[in-house]
Image: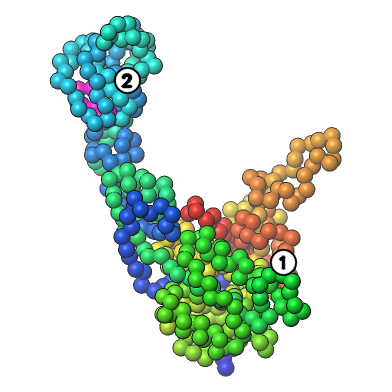
């Protein structure tokens, strides 16, 4: 059997985000999309009107920005106006002789006719009689009016943008009933290991909890994917093959395997994939502390293999599985391509993990707040752990690759990658926050 194929972190990112299946497109009704999975635009929208005024307004249409009095010219303080009518948002205007000193009462959002020069807000007038008001301050031309921009000033939303709740509302208000989006994904999650259990404590001597599967399904759901639990199977290649065959009949697009990637005799995940109709792109990373990670295709299904070690699995998910899934959802490159992001840390305090200089290394990146202001009481200083994820200066901390856990929160802010040699960290990746992409 040939030796395991290893790739660098950047090569792994290129492979998992370019070996994509054909992206399917469907129409998404914006008025019924509440609560649906996150989707991404399959085509750009380049003809939206500007944000001022009402989004669905045609070019050059103007509206009142507050309740007030529409007049045909600027007015000075102490001017009295005769109110000749009332216009609400339906825009039914009376016939007006726009002589000096005439106004029309308008509601906020009411469309304005061409003769209106400004809208005097209600707060700037005093009622002095029946259908008569006095202006309390000067009002210049254009005041109290929104919209009226030419057609060439439009809102551009590129393909790959996330159809977030706010974007759905804006598009719907712009008169757009539906948009073309890339279809969602069904992701199967399978844990591998004879010793694993998800039954909860107490555990027998030969059992241990499924530490990776514990968080994986929930993380996938928070990232907007449909999760199909596939349970726990033994390390036998036949058991893994049976699950992959059933996954196709269940219309699963991606399978994430957790476990069975070590060097032990019982770790046979990669072997199982090689024995069957599977194209294995790589099964190792040239990355100290996260060597166990594979990517394959089996019967039209993308297969990702994570280590059973929780921290190493977290790294692999953040840096390769999540970007791969976002690419398969049609998300714009800016949302997942961390290879183009340089390290935004100036003079970081870097503690390098142990390891040879001929492999990439990885650090857990976090932010540490500046020291608290001097206090007469030493007890008033909070512990250093209280400063994690604050707005202070950035700092990079190492985690021990030989251990499945670390005192620093994995991925608190992101991951910094150090290429071979003695150079500084070259890349940093901040995993997108679920719901805000």
Q: Residues within 10 Å of mark 1 (few under 14, many from 20)?
A: some
In the rendered structure, the answer to whether residue 190 lies left or right of residue 424 reads: left
Q: Residue at x 54, y 84 (%)?
A: 240
Residue 210 visible, this orientation: no
Q: Residue at x 61, y 70 (%)?
A: 213
Read off the magenta span: 110-118
Coordinates of residue 236 in the picture (x, y in percent): 60, 88
Coordinates of residue 245 in the picture (x, y in percent): 46, 84
Q: Is residue 115 magenta?
A: yes
Label drawn at residue 137 = none
Report the coloring of the rendering: rainbow
- Gap between marks 2 and 1, in whole Å? 64 Å
Q: Secondary structure at mark 2?
A: strand
Q: Secondary structure at mark 1?
A: loop
Instruction: Identify whether 199 is placed above or below 78.
Output: below
Residue tagged by mark 2?
Answer: 68
Question: Which is more toward the observer, 101 or 202?
Answer: 202
Residue tagged by mark 1?
Answer: 405
The chief SS type of the magenta part is loop
Q: Quadrant of residue 373?
A: top right
In the rendered structure, the answer to whether residue 411 lies left or right of residue 101 reads: right
């Amino acid at each position: 059997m040939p030796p395991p194929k290893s790739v660098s972190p950047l090569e792994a990112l290129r492979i998992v985000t370019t070996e994509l299946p054909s992206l399917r497109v469907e129409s998404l009704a914006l008025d019924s999309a509440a609560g649906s999975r996150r989707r991404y635009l399959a085509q750009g929208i380049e003809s939206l009107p500007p944000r001022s005024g009402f989004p669905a307004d045609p070019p050059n249409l103007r509206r009142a920005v507050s309740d007030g009095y529409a007049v045909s010219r600027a007015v000075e303080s102490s001017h009295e106006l005769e109110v000749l009518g009332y216009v609400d948002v339906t825009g039914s205007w009376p016939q007006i002789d726009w002589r000096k000193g005439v106004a029309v009462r308008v509601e906020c959002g009411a469309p304005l006719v061409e003769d209106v020069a400004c809208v005097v807000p209600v707060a700037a007038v005093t009622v002095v009689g029946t259908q008569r008001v006095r202006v309390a301050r000067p009002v210049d031309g254009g005041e109290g009016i929104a919209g009226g921009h030419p057609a060439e000033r439009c809102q551009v939303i590129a393909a790959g943008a996330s159809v977030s709740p706010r974007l759905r509302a804006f598009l719907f208000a712009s008169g757009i009933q539906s948009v073309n989006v890339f279809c969602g994904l069904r992701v199967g999650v399978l844990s591998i290991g004879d010793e694993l259990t998800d039954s909860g404590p107490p555990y027998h001597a030969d059992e241990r909890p499924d530490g990776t599967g514990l968080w994986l399904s929930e993380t996938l759901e928070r990232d907007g994917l449909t999760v199909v639990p596939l349970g726990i199977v033994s390390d036998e290649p036949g058991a893994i093959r049976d699950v992959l065959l059933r996954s196709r009949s269940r219309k699963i697009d991606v399978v994430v395997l957790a476990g069975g990637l070590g060097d032990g005799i019982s770790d046979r995940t990669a072997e199982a994939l090689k024995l069957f109709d599977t194209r294995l792109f790589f099964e190792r990373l040239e990355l100290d502390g996260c060597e166990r990670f594979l990517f394959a295709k089996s019967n039209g299904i993308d297969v990702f293999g994570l280590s059973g070690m929780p921290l190493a699995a977290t790294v692999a998910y953040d840096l390769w599985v999540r970007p791969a899934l976002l690419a398969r959802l049609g998300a714009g490159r800016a949302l997942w391509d961390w290879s183009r992001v340089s390290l935004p840390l100036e003079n970081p305090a870097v503690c390098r993990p142990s390891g040879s200089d001929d492999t990439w290394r990885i650090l857990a990146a976090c932010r540490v707040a500046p020291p608290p202001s001097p206090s007469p009481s030493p007890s008033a200083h909070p512990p250093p752990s209280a400063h994690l994820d604050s707005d202070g200066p950035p700092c990079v901390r190492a985690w021990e690759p030989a251990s499945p856990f670390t005192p620093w929160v994995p991925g608190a802010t992101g991951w910094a990658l150090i290429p071979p040699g003695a150079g500084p960290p070259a890349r940093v990746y901040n995993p997108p926050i679920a719901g805000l992409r």
